[in-house]
Image (cartoon, coloured by chain):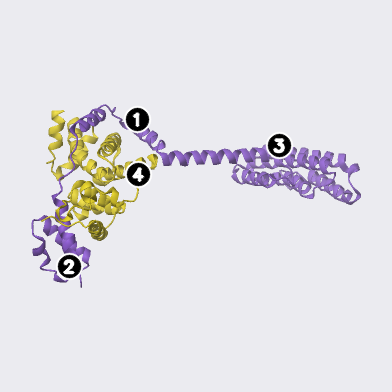
Chain colours: A purple, B yellow
Amino acid sequence: MKRKIEEILDILIEEIKEGKSVESCLKDYPEYADELRPLLFFVADIEEIPEPEVNPAAFSRIMARVNSIPEQKGIKGYLYGFRNLLLRPVVLKTVSLILIFTFILSMTFSFSADSLPGDFLYPVKCFCEKTQLAMTFNVKDKSRLHLELADRKMRDFKLVFEKEEKINRELLNSMIDEASNALQYCEFLSSEECSTLVAKAKDCHKKQIKVLQTIKPQVHDTDHTLIIEAIDKCSLACQCANPCLSPEE
Amino acid sequence: MDSYSSLLKNNEINQRDIPEIVSRAKKGDKNSKEKLFGYIYPKLYRFIYYRTNNKAEAQDLTGDVILKIAKALPRQRGNFNSWIYSVARNTVIDFYRKESVRKSKISIEDMPGELKDGSKDFTETILNEEALKKAMEFLSERQKEVIILKFREGYKNREVAEIIGTSEGAVKLLQFRALKKMREYFEEVRYEKKD
């Protein structure tokens, strides 16, 4: 197989370094002689250039500084290395960007807490609530969170009604559903915890009924049926909410 | 000073002894540290010198590199040669990034004295350190590193490949292209070898 020109040049460079003359090197490769001759003469010239001189005074100054570096051993050494890593421009920039991003994100989440349907940040608030539910793994906490969300939805429902004087169906349904959803975890709780949860869910539904009855006289005729249906749903949920009892009881 | 001067001159440390010296220097042995830095200082200085504008800059940057190496030495893992050159490479890059120094394209006016003068007979021109440095400005960073490590430091292809993180084949190709480019540069200024 024919050798590549860069490989032949490399072989010839080694021969030049060993002290062979350019012409004697090229004898074995006459087909490349014209192309390689100037390069080999050039290499021979480079080899003859004296090395740039090092300043001993500069070296001694550096060694004095090197010797003054305190020894970093064990955990201290790693902490020192970690500090140095943090101070590297790329790491510093990345950490700053992450912090700024986290700050902006947390500010957006906190501002979205008071938003209502139709507001710019309302989708963010819904996203936060869903994430919060998904990230809660303890069933007791999860059921508590459902009740909290039911309360928040009820507050929002009232605010939207005061503002727009009309029923927001989405909020109405979700406030009732959230309170009922809290009870789905009862089978994983002790009977005492379950009774407390049922009592809280009932309270929540009662509050909802109270709110619905307060606004009932003020709603338009078109929404009247909706309110009555919602009150019925809440009352039914209150009556049925007793999953801790065994069939015999 | 005298001891350091003699240390600098004493570059005859056997390559095979380096791992042992590095290992002792990592444990804090002062004598080994001095030997090691005496050995790598000229190498790093030359490596940096061909990539900077002047000797003072190269000297300062070499100092910075030595300090960085001294601080991080106890935690160093892997190939020592490859590591020290990567510290040097990154320090030079950081320096130019900070200083926002943009290397201007070399024109005939930028050539070293003896090359610039058109009236001179270029056949009499000797290839010197400065002229080589100028010619190297036309090379890519990797080509530059191959030329420095191979022709100034005397490393073998395998060692150069390890240091710059590539294959031996790629080193040969980089070497061929770099030499061709530099030769063309000297052709342009009608450089001819002095007999």
Task: Tell me the quarter of the picture where residue A164 sits.
Answer: top right
Give, as a three-letter code, the residue at label 3: Thr
Q: Nearer the viewer, mark 2 or mark 3?
A: 2
> Closer to the N terminus: mark 1 or mark 2?
2
Residue under pointer 1? A76
Q: Is residue B169 above or below residue A141?
A: below
User: What number is the disc on residue A196?
Assistant: 3
Mark 3 to mark 4 CA distance (whole Å): 66 Å
Q: Is residue A147 left or right of residue B101?
A: right
Q: Is residue A77 left or right of residue A122?
A: left
3 and 1 marks in contact (CB < 8 Å) = no
Foreground of the two, B178 or A137:
B178
2 and 4 marks in contact (CB < 8 Å) = no
Q: Nearer the viewer, mark 3 or mark 4?
A: 4
Q: Nearer the viewer, mark 2 or mark 4?
A: 2
Residue under pointer 2? A34
> Closer to the N terminus: mark 2 or mark 3?
2
